[in-house]
Amino acid sequence: MNLLAKDKIGDIELILIKNKKLPKNLSKAEKDSLDKYDFDGSGSCMLLEYKKFFIGIDDCGYEFPNAIRDSISQAIQKLKSLKINSISIEASSESELKEICEGFLLGNYSFDSYKTKKSKNHIKEIYIQSTKLTKTQIENQISQSKIITESINKIRELINTPPQDATPNYVANFAHKIAKDSNISCKIHDSKFLKKENMEAFLAVAKASINEPFMVHLHYKPNTKKKVPKIALVGKGLTYDSGGLSLKPGDYMTTMKADKSGACAVIGILEIVAKLKLEVEVHGILGLAENMIGGNAYKPDDILTARNKKTIEVRNTDAEGRLVLADCLSYASDLKPDYLIDLATLTGACVVALGDYTIGIMGYNQKLKENFAKHAFNAGELSGILPFNPYLKKLYSSEVADLCNIPSSRYGSAISAGMFLGEFVSKDLQDKWIHLDIAGPAYVEKSWGVNPFGATGAGVRACVEFIRNIKE
Ligand code: BES
Ligand code: ZN
Ligand code: ZN
């Protein structure tokens, strides 16, 4: 399916209806037909005999970034099974054009690699035209949207890949391949390296798995002599989270293949930044491991020494993400970045607090969090700031170690988990760090917005938008 800047009417013409205002140039027959369908400008309506598809853009009455994106995405899902070759659409502004492109390209993805019957899409070409924008403007937006959405769809596929295939080794090789095809260097560190780095917390989580853990270090440096901002991204990459000895109940274990979504998002962000040739230096650190059970498993009651020498009492092996991230954040701190961002499907509590569709933003720097939230919104991702406080921090103190890996109360545990992570970010970076809990939006078992069933690529568009707007 190819998006083209072309003044041509397709087999089907998509018409966006805003504020329930139908276009003036409809024929009497078309008007009668719409009447027949009782179409009042909300929802969508197909007029096959006249080759038109009307999409009512629902105004939810408050600022919402995705009205057009979501509608286009729903339209393409409906239209792709029809035997039509082309679609055409008019974009009335730059922001609308961006939403149209992303709606088509993100909405078109579906995960069917493991199905014997693949879903069909007959649509080959989508013509985008505009009386307000130049052909070059349209072409530039199409090529940018293609870069962003192709990476997102690639990592959606990676996250959706079942855990018997998508092992830590598989994800590391995937990252390596992406890096080779873009201008990114990639080092895959095995457990020998993790031992040498004293990453005992990370290693403990992986102990019971037959699949070896890896820490992948991706690095993109732009081709410029200018001093550019340096960003370090850290991603939780649990290719499976069974809970370990604190085993998850069956219902909660399903979908835990998606516990690698943070690491996969980091791969996507690096690929996009490199392809857009952004003038920023970006490091990506992926903590890849599998949390399993076995005779060699780490246990509740173990006391682990993290890379930064802090000791951690394990009271629940299902709070494993923070142990992997503890060592990765300490490693990333040594890179002395200007910004440090971690992405993790860290807590069920964040989903309870914000719902399925919203990223939890945490950290110590209010301005930075607000700035990130603004860019996330502009990119079409929903987020909410969850505030740290010293009372919640007290909840993860331990009688026998420096810290405990679970808080003593379940209330506010998305926040206390975030504050736990902060213990492994170096002192000088506390103000430059943000933690993104993507447990809600990373994987949803129903389609929503531009997202079909399953992995969404949560955090990618938000981070890319934040990174491209960093001003030194
Ligand atoms: N991977 C889970 C968090 C999660 C839950 C992600 C739901 C996506 C959807 C994480 O490792 C976990 O199990 N967290 C526990 C922490 C608890 C033991 C303190 C949780 O949230 O229940
Ligand atoms: Zn867990
Ligand atoms: Zn987990």
Image (cartoon, helix red, strand yellow):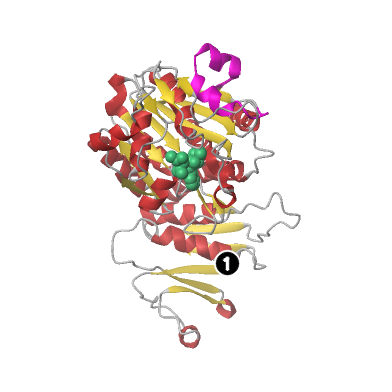
Q: Position of residue 301 (x, y in %)?
A: 48, 27
Instruction: Give the residue number, with chain letter if any, for mark 1.
Output: 78
**Would residue 189 be counted in the magenta stretch?**
yes
Relative height, residue 426 to residue 43 (above, below): above
**Would residue 408 be counted in the magenta stretch?**
no
Out of 124 and 137, give the one closest to the viewer: 124
- Count all numbered tags in the image, as a single digit: 1
Please give the name of the residue rendered at 39% of the width and 77% of the height, measured from the top-left corner: 22
Please give the name of the residue rendered at 33% of the width and 24% of the height, measured from the top-left corner: 338
User: Residue furthest toward the right?
Assistant: 116
Q: Quadrant of residue 292?
A: top right
Q: Position of residue 24 (x, y in %)?
A: 38, 78
Q: In what quadrant of the picture does the N terminus appear?
A: bottom right
Relative height, residue 131 to residue 236 (above, below): below
Q: In what quadrant of the picture does the C terminus appear?
A: top left
Left or right: where does residue 190 sit relative to residue 99? right
Task: Report the amino acid beneath label 1.
Answer: Lys
Left or right: where does residue 253 sit relative to residue 65? right
Out of 192 and 223, give the one closest to the viewer: 192
Report the span colored magenta.
Answer: 186-211
Q: Position of residue 142 (x, y in %)?
A: 49, 48
Q: Position of residue 23 (x, y in %)?
A: 40, 75
